[in-house]
Amino acid sequence: MSEQMSFSLQLEQTEGFEFKVKFDWPDVAELLLDEPEPLGKKHGPNAARLIAAAVANCVTIMAMPAVPSAASSLPALNPNQPTHNIPAPTVVNTRLLGFIGCCG
């Protein structure tokens, strides 16, 4: 594993519920986090959306090795059926439902 097991970041409050996140990678842009109204101004994703995106990323990455083997194990399609002439979709849409809140 070439990636370090630890990392650091800086969190700077810009105003209200808006925060600027600086990562320890020099080539990665800063990330702006903000809460939706009425708490914030929705200038960026809130922490719950960021965590949901991270979880969706991990789930998709873990499922990627299974996709080629699943496609090759399917039986041959009947070419006489019109729906079998369209290519298989390659985009995965994921929707995670949940709530993560902070109390201060």
Image (cartoon, rainbow, N blue to C red):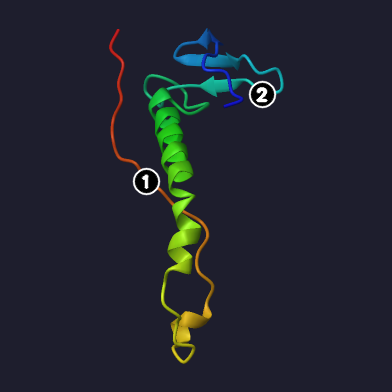
| Residue that protrudes farthest toward the bottom in the picture | 80
Q: Which residue is mark 2?
A: 28
Would you place residue 40 above or below residue 69 in this image? above
Residue furthest out toward the right: 27
Pick whichever, 38 or 43, lies toward us: 43
- Residue 36: image location, x then y, percent: 41, 27
Q: Amino acid at mark 1?
A: Arg
Which quadrant is home to the C terminus?
top left
16 lies left or right of 2: left
Name the residue at 45% across, 82% down.
Answer: 77
What residue appears at the point 44 percent right and 37 percent down from the top-left corner?
A: 58
Which image quadrant: the N terminus? top right
Q: Horizontal and vertical percent for residue 90?
A: 52, 60
Please report whichever mark, 1 or 2, sits nearer to the chain's N-terminal start.
Answer: 2
At x 48%, y 49%, the residue is: 64
Residue 35 x, y percent position in the rendering: 42, 23
- Badge 1: few (under 14), some or many (20 or more) residues near its Cα, within 10 Å? few
Say what secondary structure mark 1 lies in: loop
Residue 2 lies in what quarter of the image?
top right
Say which residue appears at 38% left-offset and 19% top-offset. Answer: 39
The secondary structure type at the circle numbered 2 is loop
**Amino acid type assigned to the residue bearing label 2 in the image:** Val
Give the x, y percent position of residue 26: 70, 17
How many C-alpha atoms fall within 10 Å of the one at disc 2: few (<14), some, or many (≥20)? few
User: Looking at the picture, does residue 36 appear above or below residue 72?
Assistant: above
- The alpha-carbon separation of the residues under discs 1 and 2 comes to 26 Å
Side of 97 where 3 appears, left or right: right
Q: Relative to the observer, which residue lies in front, 99 or 57?
A: 57
Q: Which residue is mark 1?
A: 95
